[in-house]
Image (cartoon, rainbow, N blue to C red):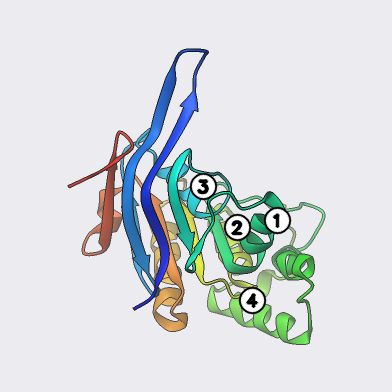
Amino acid sequence: MSEVIVFEDLWKIYSAGSLLEVAALKEINFAVTKGDFLFVLGPSGSGKTTLLNIAGLLDSPTKGKYFLFGRNFSGIGEREKAKIRNESIGFVFQQPSFLPEFTSLENVLMPAMISGKISASTARKANGLFERVGLEGRKNHFPSQLSGGELQRLTIIRALINGPGVILCDEPTGQLDERNSEIIMEILRGINRDFGTTVVFVTHNAQLTKGGKTVNLKDGKISA
């Protein structure tokens, strides 16, 4: 088994004034293995989003080490991080964000265009993903014409378009009703099962994590 993500004695400390420091993360040590579907569970303010931001190269630890796909990303430059984010990491956030002037299909193809990987096979892949999540009739719709649940499914397609090794999910069901939440969970579990894509899913909802591999966070530390 290969480790996709590794945190080694990782801390994130924020300055809150000239003399005050706040530790959002403290002594984080754990690994995520290729093919895992891992939940990170904790209440608001526990450090879940900070941890996910570091995992997604959107933030850097204050001290400690962070490894992604076997590479130590401590001290790596922003340009290189941006390249890895676009090509190797998929993001599914709580609040979907799309360019309103582009269609659904154009929006999900954007990461491939940025990375220079756009091709006929990319378009075929996109069409297959639209069918997989039940949005085949929405490809030419604009984001403003889609419901909240449909937008979140569109986010998943965009996250997958470059074939990432890991998908990072930050409370993606947090603003959805029960049925749409179930749909999103079914899609993500299917992707994990069928494609072998590693999924890290941040949530405060313990009901979602039942029977799943879980890391519990409390006050910035891993708890039992």
Q: Which residue is mark 1?
A: 143
Q: Residue at x 46, y 49 (%)?
A: 52
Question: Picture quarter containing residue 7?
Answer: bottom left
Task: Specify the amino acid type for callout 1.
Answer: Pro
Marks 3,1: beta carbons within 8 A: no
Left or right: where 3 falls relative to 153? left
Sequence-first disc among 2 and 3: 3
Q: Residue at x 76, y 53 (%)?
A: 99
Task: Specify the amino acid type for callout 4.
Answer: Glu
Where residue 33 sits in the image (x, y, percent)?
36, 70
Where residue 171 sits in the image (x, y, percent)?
44, 49
In the displayed structure, would residue 62 be above or below residue 148? above
Q: CA distance from mark 4 to mark 1?
A: 14 Å
Q: Which residue is mark 2?
A: 151
Q: Which residue is mark 4?
A: 136
Q: Which residue is mark 3?
A: 53
